[in-house]
Image (cartoon, rainbow, N blue to C red):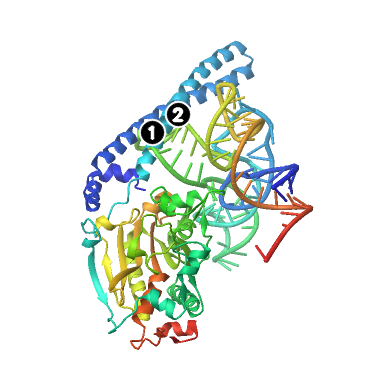
Amino acid sequence: MLELQRIRAEKKEIVERMKVRNMDTQSILDLIEELDSEKRATQVELDNKQADLNKMSQSVGALFKEGKKEEANEMRSKASAMSDEIKGVKAKFAKLGDKITEQLFHLPNVPNTNVPNGKSDQENQLISEHGTRPQLSNALPHWELAKKFDLIDFELGVKLTGAGFPVYRGKGAILQRALINFFLSEAIKEGYEEVIPPILVNEASGYGTGQLPDKEGQMYHVGADDLYLIPTAEVPVTNILRNTIVKESQFPIKMTAYTPCFRREAGSYGKDVRGLNRLHQFDKVEIVQAVHPNNSEKTLQEMVSYVQSLLNKLGLEHRIVRLCGGDLGFAAAHTFDFEVYSAAQEKWLEVSSVSNFETFQSNRLKLRFKSDEGKTMLAHTLNGSALALPRIVASILENFQLDSGEGIKIPEVLVPFTGFDKID
RNA sequence: GGAGAGAUGGCAGAGUGGUCGAAUGCACCGGUCUUGAAAACCGGCAUACUGAAAGGUAUCGGGGGUUCGAAUCCCUCUCUCUCCGCCA
């Protein structure tokens, strides 16, 4: 959520930067500014009237004590009138506040100056490519490999739950667990504290990180208890810091978590959802940081390098792209995506997204820090997938399958975690 | 799930309609004293909005109500604790 002070101070720049998202925010910002100044004026009026009432009320008490009953009653009826008047002003004040939040809640983050213009993912900026492509003459897609080697049973998941809820079994399940362990132990080496958060969150947490109200329909909602299944560990982990004031010396705050993630993916269809490409339930290790505002872009770069190191260790060909304004998520100010090459599908699969949210989340979360000068300011938050499992599994299966068709080689770094070096 | 009790500043804990934004203790910060420390003593110590400042306003778990006036009374929600039941 944008800060009102920022809108007041930099409206022109914000309008310019929002154009990068192909959004014209001029009129909405004008409206917010107008509502804001009206609200502030109303507050002054309210404060003054309230101050008057407080004085009157005090004198009622004093007059009664002095035994001046008539004067007291007179004052009381005057105060009563003032009290009614205040009720009206209060209602107006609250209504203005609601209107402002309503507007603010639906306004996405301002892309920072590193973000290029662009309408869709077609215009994302290729930053770098790494690794080599395996030479395979008859590569099978991962869903066929999964079936052939009895690793993942999609039909069984349909029986138990529905499409998009696969059952991993045997070496498929072990590979899954090995990847989780590998990612967590790497993150811990990198200085992240591991947490195991709840995977159901309340409404306030959903608002805190920006999934609500923007992505309302994307989350599974447990109606009986009014809780949401998390779409990413970002939600519970970042909300750990909701409503806190940390010391500047505590920065950077680094946390990592493995959780299953749940997404309704309403509207997805076709070959995009084939196999592991898009699931309703999947596993992911997430990294989250809260840092000093001056350091967030540097931190973003560090997180990008870290994610890259994971893909290098796994030996997967990948590329890094910088999202253009049109592809940027609602809450993000700057995002890098990681894509791995899928040898059999012959396309790039997104496996990680690393973002700087600047103050967008911390403003909602009320995540602040006390600077060394004693000033209370909003922190910057960042997070990234490190990594999302399904497409990593897909590309491991596809890229490391033996051309002979006899099996799949396990990346060396995973062998200590799997206990086997080959699926056959 | 049933019965009861409770929620106050960083923590502990007073306060049950009128100078209460809130006693007191601890913690914390500054000072005096000390070779240094401890102790003792003195002072400071919530957040937000508003104002040049003085100050004003709001906040005692959340929301609503009664009243001239609510931490204090009423309603409601959430959470915590105790007992019973159930249970990995």
| Relative height, residue B16 to residue A381 (above, below) | above
Q: Could you tell me which secondary element the residue under label 2 belongs to? A: helix
Q: Where residue A186 sits: x, y (%)?
A: 44, 76
Could you tell whether A52 is left or right of A16 in the image?
Answer: right
- Image-quadrant location for residue A399: bottom left
Q: Is residue A342 visible?
A: yes
Among the two numbered marks 1 and 2 on one chain, the one whose residue lies closer to the N terminus: 2
- Image-quadrant location for residue A164: bottom left
Disc 1: CA contacts within 10 A as few (<14), some (14-19) or many (>=20): many
Residue type beneath disc 2: Lys
Residue type beneath disc 1: Leu
- Between circles 1 and 2, the one closer to the viewer is 1
Q: Which mark is residue A96?
A: 1
**Count of marks, rendered view:** 2
| Relative height, residue A394 to residue A160 (above, below) | below
Q: Are marks 1 and 2 on the same chain?
A: yes
Q: Where residue A403 sits: x, y (%)?
A: 33, 87
Q: Could you tell me which secondary element the residue under label 1 belongs to? A: helix
| Relative height, residue A348 to residue B30 (above, below) | below
Q: Residue at x 41, y 54 (%)?
A: A218
Q: Residue at x 55, y 21 (%)?
A: A59
Please state which of residues A53 and A220 is positioned toward the viewer in this rendering.
Answer: A220
Tag 2, which chain?
A: A
In contact (CB < 8 Å): disc 1 and disc 2: no
Image quadrant containing the C terminus of chain A? bottom left
Q: Where residue B21 sits: x, y (%)?
A: 54, 37
Q: Is residue A376 visible?
A: no
Disc 2: CA contacts within 10 A as few (<14), some (14-19) or many (>=20): some
Q: Which mark is residue A90?
A: 2
Please state which of residues B48 and A407 is positioned toward the viewer in this rendering.
Answer: A407
Q: Where residue A111 sits: x, y (%)?
A: 27, 54
Please state which of residues A334 and A404 is positioned toward the viewer in this rendering.
Answer: A404
